Image: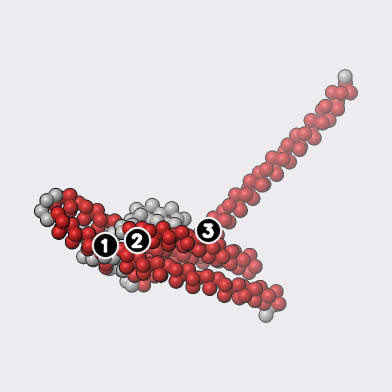
């Protein structure tokens, strides 16, 4: 093995354990958060419906029904779905919700409705967002170092295929979206814009496989690191173009000044 390549490989292998350790902490944090959200929010809608029926009986029935429909919608349920509130706030979907909190995507399609859930969401985001920034920064630097040291130019094509083309095909298959809608959703999600007009793993008429939510969470995390790295490259490119334009403008100014100096000298001799 080439000594330079061997040295670089040893350097990356020495950094890998720290990244893996942070990754384990991050995944554990999200999973525990998803478990707590599941327990805090899963019972709320059923309790709300039962208490509303008992307290209101037949009076103000229309208003009560509207409130129940609104609560169901905010809990992520739909009239087309046969799932219970606890069925929606299952462990996998709650973990994906926790991931959207710490990554600041925040689709807004579901929200915590209980007081305990809202307070926990604040505390969870307060510590989870800095943790997310730290680990994304480490992973992004690791990917950038691999690209620079090993000169893997094809890496960008591979990652583009992995984080945009593959999800696009997957969302078209399982969500029934067009290619344009799937690409739009991929960018809106990974850029953390998160409008919430398109949300994967949220259609009550579709029976998603169990691995779908886990794959979504992994795609979001690694895709965020990749897109952040891509945006940094775009910033570097724009700064290079700006520096080139400034240098060209300064050179042009110096040429014009050099032309003006002989003219001033001739005018001085004539006088």
Tell me whether circle 2 and circle 1 mark residues in contact (CB < 8 Å): yes
Circle number at residue 228: 3
Whether residue 179 appears in this view of the structure is: no
Residue 62 showing in the rendered view: yes
Residue occupying image coordinates x 69% and y 40%: 249
How dense is the environment of label 2, judged by Cα within 10 Å: few (below 14), some, or many (20 and up)?
some
Q: Which mark is residue 44?
A: 1
Is residue 77 toward the left or the right of residue 116 in the image?
Answer: left
Residue at the location (89% across, 23% down)? Answer: 269
Which residue is labeled 2 in the image? 117
Q: Quadrant of the N terminus?
A: bottom right
How far apart in space, not on screen, are marks 2 and 1 (Cα)? 10 Å
The numbered mark, 3 or 2, whose residue comes first in the sequence reads: 2
- Mark 3 Cα shell of 10 Å, populated few (<14), some (14-19), many (≥20): some
Q: Earlier in the sequence, mark 1 or mark 3?
A: 1
Determine whether the residue tagged by mark 3 lies in a helix, strand or loop: helix
Q: Specify few, some or many for label 1: CA neighbours under 10 Å numbering under 14, 14-19, or 20 or more.
A: some
């Amino acid at each position: 093995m080439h000594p330079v390549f061997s040295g670089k490989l040893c350097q990356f292998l020495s950094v890998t354990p720290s990244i893996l350790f942070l990754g384990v902490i991050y995944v554990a944090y999200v999973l525990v958060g998803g478990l707590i959200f599941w327990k805090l929010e899963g019972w709320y809608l059923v309790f709300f419906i039962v208490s509303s029926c008992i307290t209101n009986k037949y009076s103000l029935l229309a208003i009560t029904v509207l409130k129940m429909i609104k609560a169901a919608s905010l809990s992520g349920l739909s009239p087309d779905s046969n799932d219970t509130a606890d069925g929606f706030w299952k462990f996998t979907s709650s973990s994906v919700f926790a991931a959207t909190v710490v990554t600041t995507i925040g689709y807004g399609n579901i929200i915590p409705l209980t007081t305990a859930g809202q307070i926990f969401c604040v505390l969870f985001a307060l510590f989870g967002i800095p943790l997310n920034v730290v680990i994304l920064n480490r992973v992004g630097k690791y990917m950038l170092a691999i690209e620079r040291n090993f000169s893997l130019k094809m890496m960008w094509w591979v990652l583009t295929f992995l984080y945009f083309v593959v999800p696009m095909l997957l969302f078209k298959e399982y969500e029934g979206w067009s290619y344009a809608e799937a690409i739009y959703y991929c960018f809106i999600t990974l850029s953390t814009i998160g409008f919430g007009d398109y949300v994967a793993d949220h259609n009550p008429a579709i029976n998603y496989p169990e691995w779908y939510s886990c794959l979504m969470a992994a795609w979001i995390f690694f895709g965020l690191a990749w897109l952040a790295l891509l945006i940094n490259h775009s910033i570097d490119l724009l700064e290079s173009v700006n520096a080139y334009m400034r240098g060209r403008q300064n050179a042009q100014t110096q040429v014009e000044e050099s032309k003006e100096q002989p003219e001033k000298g001739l005018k001085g001799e004539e006088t």
